[in-house]
Amino acid sequence: MSPDTPLIDCHGLDVRYGGTRALHGIDFHIDRGEIVTIVGPNGSGKSTFLRALIGAVPLSGGEIRHAPGLRIGYVPQRLQIDPTLPITVARFLCLPDAVPRARIASALDTAGVPDLSHRQMAALSGGQFQRVLLARALLSDPDLLILDEATQGLDQPGSAAFYRQIEGLRDDLGCAVLMVSHELHVVMSASDRVICLNGHVCCEGTPETVSAAPAYQALFGTGTQGALALYRHEHHGHSHDDIDRPAAE
């Protein structure tokens, strides 16, 4: 795969559910090493967009091109596991196919939860659970890591720690990251590029450009600019040691 080839490149993407048009006219690309965040109000098509990119939703128009051999790791918005089901983290990571112990240990360590292999899935905190899902996504050695509101249920410090972990992964692994989040004040500062979606692309660019755009402010107001600046200040004051702590609930 050429380093200059976009990992995903799509043009004129349209998705319909019955007679309802969920997405229309979307042009999008993501390059290796980028962190791109999709923001938008509820019902704006963010999750539909991600599912379309991975082929889980049929297109009604447009085209999507994946780089040859593209490996994608996906962290879903939520995953329900029966709390009475006796399954360890290691066994969960071996579904549906067995994975060598060394690879499991490496993925858990990279995800920031190195000591959870023998814990029951039902006994994990919200932050630990999400990092196990992240470890699962890392087992594919992804070129592109996709996260669909992966910090739902975590408090603000837990979310911030999780996204710092994602930034560290991008730096260490060289993968691209595409994520959807409603936590504007957190993810904006972690992003190289932000795309504001509301059925179509309202605006896109750097976090500062998007937060100042009239279309963005019409949807979200102007308050996130101050939060963005504050989080940038706080983020750059953190040591990298706290990246490795499990996210709090």
Image: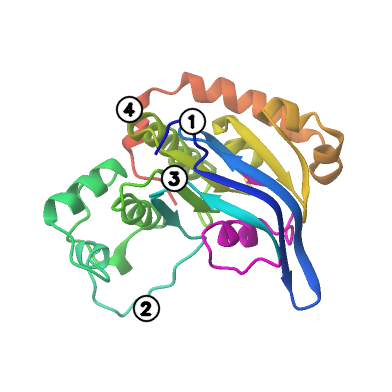
Q: Residues within 10 Å of mark 3 (few under 14, many from 20)?
A: many
Q: Is residue 3 shown above or below 152?
A: above
**Is residue 192 shown to the viewer in this render?**
yes
Kindly report which numbered mark, 2 or 1, lies closer to the viewer in this rendering: 1
Q: Are marks 2 and 3 in contact (CB under 8 Å)?
A: no
Tag 1 secondary structure: loop
Distance between the Cα atoms at labels 2 and 3? 29 Å
Q: Is residue 11 left or right of residue 140?
A: right
The residue indicated by pointer 4 is 241
Kindly report which numbered mark, 4 or 3, lies closer to the viewer in this rendering: 3
Q: What's the residue type where badge 1 is placed? A: Asp
Q: Is residue 177 shown above or below 18?
A: above
Residue found at the far left of this picture: 101
- Return the residue nearer the eye: 82 or 56: 56
Badge 2 or badge 1: first in the primary sequence: 1
Badge 3 or badge 1: first in the primary sequence: 1
The residue indicated by pointer 3 is 144
Indicate which disc residue 4 carries: 1
Badge 4 or badge 3: first in the primary sequence: 3
